[in-house]
Image (tube, rainbow, N blue to C red):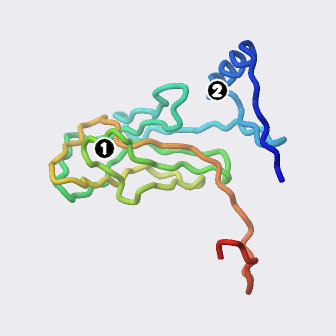
Amino acid sequence: QMQKKKLLFTKKSLKDYRAAKLRMATRPLHFGKVIIMSTLKIKKLNEKAVIPQRATSGSAGMDLYAVLDEPLTLKPGETALVPTGIAIALESANEAAFIFPRSGLAIKHGIGLLNSVGVIDSDYRGEIKVGVINQINKEYTIEPNERIAQMVIMPVSLPQIEEVTELDETERG
């Protein structure tokens, strides 16, 4: 059996821990002996495009902006494919970009993503477009340069595939 370890902090060590935690947004990620420090390359495909940025140092996602020539009104239940005017290049096949809804748009206005979460593979170089849906019974207008979604870069596992005739038994079945 594993024993639970109790973490004890002195005032100084807690202060050091908090300072280190704040620096983590700009430091390499350490996974065992592997250090991951990646660069996300972003290309503007449209002069009106806004390069995604994190709102704060603690933000996991980078806001994506609608590149529209004019406002786009979504009627209840209506869908649209909204261009962002950007393309990205991830450094590794062990990374992918995931597009999530913005909670403010979803909660306040019922605007969500058509496929719940969009996945952008490391080898995709086309324009990022966001499929949106109006999920409530009230029209909503997306304005040009409005923040419409958020993009999070995360590691992905690329296991070897092995077909088997049996799987090991577990308690859950």
- The numbered mark, 2 or 1, whose residue comes first in the sequence reads 2
Residue at screen point 52% across, 51% down: 125
For residue 14, the mark is none
For this view, does 125 lie left or right of residue 101? Answer: right
Q: Amino acid at mark 2?
A: Thr
Residue sitting at the far bottom: 165
Q: Is residue 16 above or below residue 42?
A: above
Q: CA distance from mark 2 to mark 1?
A: 30 Å
- Residue 169 position in % (x across, y down): 73, 77
Residue at screen point 49% across, 30% down: 54
- Residue 122 position in % (x across, y down): 60, 52
Q: On the rendered image, what quadrant is the C terminus found in?
A: bottom right
Residue that mark 2 sits on: 26
- Residue 10 position in % (x across, y down): 75, 16
For this view, does 162 lie left or right of residue 109? Answer: right
Residue nearest the observer in this picture, 39 or 60: 60
Residue nearest the observer in this picture, 150 or 72: 150
Residue at screen point 50% across, 55% down: 119
Q: Is residue 29 above or below residue 119?
A: above
Residue that mark 1 sits on: 107
